[in-house]
Amino acid sequence: MKKQTRNSLKRAAALLLALTLLSALTATAFADEEALDDGSPWVDYVLRENIQTVEARPETPRDDLYLYANYDWAKTTEIRPGYRSESSFNMVADEIREMSMAVLTDESLEGEDAELVQGLYSAFLDWDARNAAGVEPIQKIIDRIRDVSDLDGLTALFCDRDAHAGQFFAFSSSTGFNDPETYLLVLSTMGLLLGDSAEYAERTEMGERLEAAYRMAAGRMLPRFGYTEEEAEDMVDRALGLETELAGAIMTSAEQMSPDYIQRINNEMSLDEALATCRNFPLSTIIKGWGFDVAERCIVTEPAYFEKLDEVYTEERLEDLKNYLIVCAAIDNMGLLDRDSYEVSIAVSNMVNGSTGAEPDEEVAYQLVRGTLTTPMDRAFLAKYDATQMKEDITRICQECIDFYRRMLNEEEWLSAETRQKAIEKLDAITINAVYPDKWRDYSGLSLEGLDYFDSVMAISDFMEEYNRSLPNTKKDHKIWDFDILETNAYYNPQENSINIIRGILGGVFYQENMSREELYAGIGSVIGHEISHAFDTKGAQFDASGALNNWWTEADYNAFLSRDQKLIDFFNSMTAFGGYQVQGQNIQTEAIADMAGLKCMLGLLEEKGEVNYRDFFESYAKVWARLNTREMEYLCLMQDSHPLHYLRTNVTVQQFDQFLEAYDIREGDGMYLDPADRSLVW
């Protein structure tokens, strides 16, 4: 269950652009290019400024495996125009994009899927039509908001599915934590302009960048809707003021990454109980107007937020509420409009991400298609590129890993027999979702024929909302996957107890048919081992074999587990990344647990296969995490990402194992040495 980042499902395309459009139209918050090579125990060579200070590749990896393995790549790689990062993942994504572009431009392809994805792709690139429409699509929305004269009128606007005016909360259908088989209604908070609610109590560099970017955007967009620059500045002030009131009732990013986050949002109740959380705010009327009142059960992720929303939803605050909706309508939809508006959305991303230049329109169009027509794009891709053998290979490796994890669990002396048995039952129940699903969601009711880009996006959004309305009270079909198989990523889903190793990650350093065993296991093997271990990290361990939120641990075992986890947290907390910033062990614990357990699995499997070239394995593993970031991106990763920074994912993980120390004769005093007593393996 993913947290909504902005108010409305109607903004899906605009949000995708905000994450992917990265070009340089303005200065960034970090204007200088000075290195920040003050990290401890290693310098953060993911930062592009730091790698430029190194004149030669180290002769050995004894002090820094990450730098040793990735030096040549990092020194010769430039962050492309429109990007905030380059990495091994980007390289695989490039392969997938090139193949996908052939799907989007091959006019000989037939079928509904090809028609849909090619239609949206062409509509995005039709700048003549987009420029002719100008800002009129959003002008209509803003005019309707502006015309509201009382709260009853605002409520009516919220209930109008065609108004596209946004909301002050998010609602969707999802399976619950207590019953992973049945869909219910989820009511969650709105997104915030500054992202993290903690920014409203104490502003960080990230908050300053976001505020500056949105002020710039409002100053350029709102005058196009009839406001002066002075009015635009005041409108942003008022919007941030309203968010400041609401943000105190929204969990911070750190709280969302905490192991108890699931318990905190698992507020399941009847629909009547959920709707009763508001007296002033017309929650019941809106839910009924959107057709979600059929839901029998509901999760209210943060009840305190709806109580706070109740306080501000008054006639006295009507103009503040309208102002906020207008600011969001202008900012959130920039990427859907004409070229001038689109360029502003690019500038926003640039200020936030520290990127320069611009991605080609064709690449952005491809990302947009994948983000909004996921299933048709995935099916069209597989129709052109057969992946049957790949599916067989990945399924086999997944099963090998599960079999080894069974042996790992049996050897964990700190687990009691009772908890070990439950853990193995969960392991044996894991579903392997390899490469692509065998069943797909039906898109036959969607047509984009004759629609321009904006109307196409709205039609897709309406189609998806209709699908969401059909889900409450129904049973989940596990054969249908709810994610994009072309994303360069992999997942563990605790509510399904499934590992998902998808087509989009199968390339580059992760998977090639001619790889050595060491390269294969260091690449996709470590990814698979990582995902399996999420079933037993501090969040995944809270779910049982069926995917239900259910404590299957003895009290003593769980306390021992948390104690081992705390050692890992403390170990990371002792490190400094750059600029004096401390690594946030509490935030990255689950992913660090998974990295270490995944590598342990691969080392064990290799030993069972016979003679091992450990240097090949460890250097291949380091290349999996090759990355080059802007400072803005690295700062964001440090403060708000649940994964360790990539150089730490390499160095901290490998130094936990004797095989690494022995392969390079690493001894006390070397930068990569770690005393066995200080190792922080949880599993």
Image (spheres, rainbow, N blue to C red):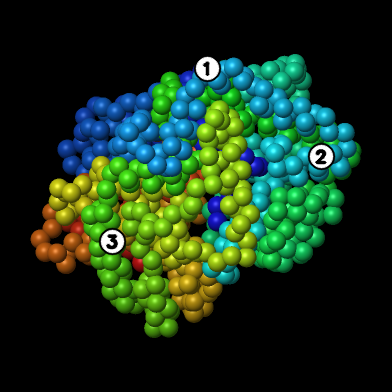
**Which mark, by number, is residue 154?**
2
Circle 2 — which element? helix
Q: Which residue is mark 3?
A: 395
**Left or right placement of residue 641 versus residue 324 in this view:** left
Q: Are marks 1 and 2 in contact (CB under 8 Å)?
A: no
Residue 16 drawn at (x, y percent):
52, 36
Please, what is the three-letter code of the amino acid marked with disc 2? Leu
630 shown above or below 584:
above
Residue 128's label in the rendered image is 1
**Residue 582, percent from left and from top:** 48, 44
| Lower sequence index among marks 3 and 2 | 2
Is 475 or 181 nearer to us in this picture? 475
Helix, strand or loop at mark 3: helix
Image side of residue 203 versus residue 585, left or right: right
Residue type at mark 3: give it.
Thr
Query: Picture quarter containing residue 33?
Result: top left
Answer whether labels 3 and 2 touch (C-beta < 8 Å).
Answer: no
Please state if 533 lies on the left or on the right of 312 as rendered.
Answer: left
Q: Secondary structure at mark 1?
A: helix
Question: What's the CA distance linking mark 3 and mark 2?
Answer: 52 Å
Residue 335, quarter of the rendered image: top right
Please report the residue visible at 51 percent of the width from the left and 19 percent of the height from the top: 127
- Quarter of the image with the N terminus in it: bottom right
Residue type pointed to by label 1: Asp
